[in-house]
Image (cartoon, rainbow, N blue to C red):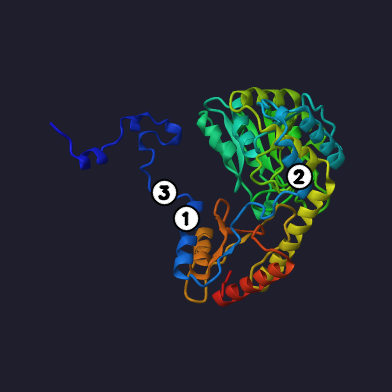
Amino acid sequence: MSTTNSETNSADPYFQSLFAERIGGSGYGKGTAIYKFEKIKRAKRKALADFPDRKLIDFGIGENDGVADAKVRERMAVEINQPENRGYADNGIGDFQQAVARFMQRNFNVTLDPATEINHCIGSKTALSMLPACFINPGDITLMTAPGYPVAGTHTTYYGGTVHKLPLLAENNFLPDLDSITDEIWERVKILVLNYPNSPTGRLCPPEFFEKVVKLAKEKKFIVVQDAAHIMLTFDGRPTSFLETPGAKDVGVEVHSLSKGFDMIGWRLGWVCGNPTLVRAFSDVKDNCDSGQFIAIQKAAVTALDDESITKRVNAKYRRRLEKLVTMLNECGFDCQMPGGSYFLYTKAPVASADGGSFDSGEAASQYLITQHSMVTVPWDDAGPYIRFSVTYEAADEAAEDALMAESKKRLMSAGLTF
């Protein structure tokens, strides 16, 4: 008996039942839930279609708008033609590890052995995805802040573990409340993931909190992973590393990125540093996941790491833009303060607009701003209704920044937002 095309197309493929439960099992691809960033993309397309003559103001982008420094690109142009750079990098090259050691010593007074306490990663995202493989067995717990970057938590669940979320609340200065964790939870905790300067709240971590974390890690027997991707975008005082904390190297590692502070978005390079045994465990897992980043990129990064002017220039640019954004939003009724770090501004979402709209969540407010005013923000509802503005929008110079702020203010004032 023959099968019609319509019957064939409507049937599930034979492998539908083979998908792993960690990505949805036999229901993979059939869900109707839409990831918030996909909702934003759809709303952006609709705004562009509905208002083709109105410029889209994009405060949602979370990646640097500038290209890597000219000296870095020139070094890359040289290295890409060198035959000795053609092969697998595996667990990295000595030149890069030594440059990282110099960088950590110079900026944080942290002394690291380049051979045993540093290893590169193909961007900090991959490091955060691999580290749970070193520790998580079924039933184990990873502590994650909410809101927060979800990758380590996603991979924790892949290995049969559980994520215990710690909300970042204003009343706790956007620090996780470690005292709220029960003994039952502590018995299963393997990893605490921190991220300071924090994305998306922009808050910094005071030294005494890191000291508390080190003490708890030794007492409760868990390891600490500090995601320092935004560390060179610190605006309140000097950048500080978790590894500066006495005893930190006994309990954890810090993950760094060349994306944010060095304008090397897309180059995919970072590093894991800290406790030598933890770095070795990461390296063993990494050895079974990738063959290392292109050596020419690592050598170009040496130029970046040794040039202090690069991070200072990038920092100054985003500090300036954030100062302008804070001023403009406060004039429009928001209650904003300059963040301590990152290029994000995290603020309470409006609850209503002059045209009768009401918003019961950050997502509702964000969708209103996109669809009605062609202004893109990112909603966060993990710990109350908030929206995030990023200052990584494209603007050729300060005059263009000022023009964008003026147009943003005009639209927000016309919206008549209430809080």
Identify residue for label 2: 74
Write the residue at 36% across / 38% down.
27
Q: Which amino acid, by three-letter code, is at mark 1?
A: Lys
Write the residue at 72% across / 62% down.
321
Q: In this view, does 230 lie to the left or right of 145?
A: right
Nearer the observer, 366 or 224: 366
Q: Is residue 290 left or right of residue 360?
A: right
Q: Which amino acid, by three-letter code, is at mark 2?
A: Glu
Identify residue for label 3: 33
Label 1 and label 3: CA atoms lie apart by 10 Å
Identify residue for label 1: 39
* Quarter-of-image position of residue 101: top right
Label 3 and label 2: CA atoms lie apart by 45 Å
Nearer the observer, 370 or 91: 91
Residue 401 seen in the current view: yes
State whether residue 171 is above or below residue 140.
below
The numbered mark, 2 or 1, whose residue comes first in the sequence reads 1
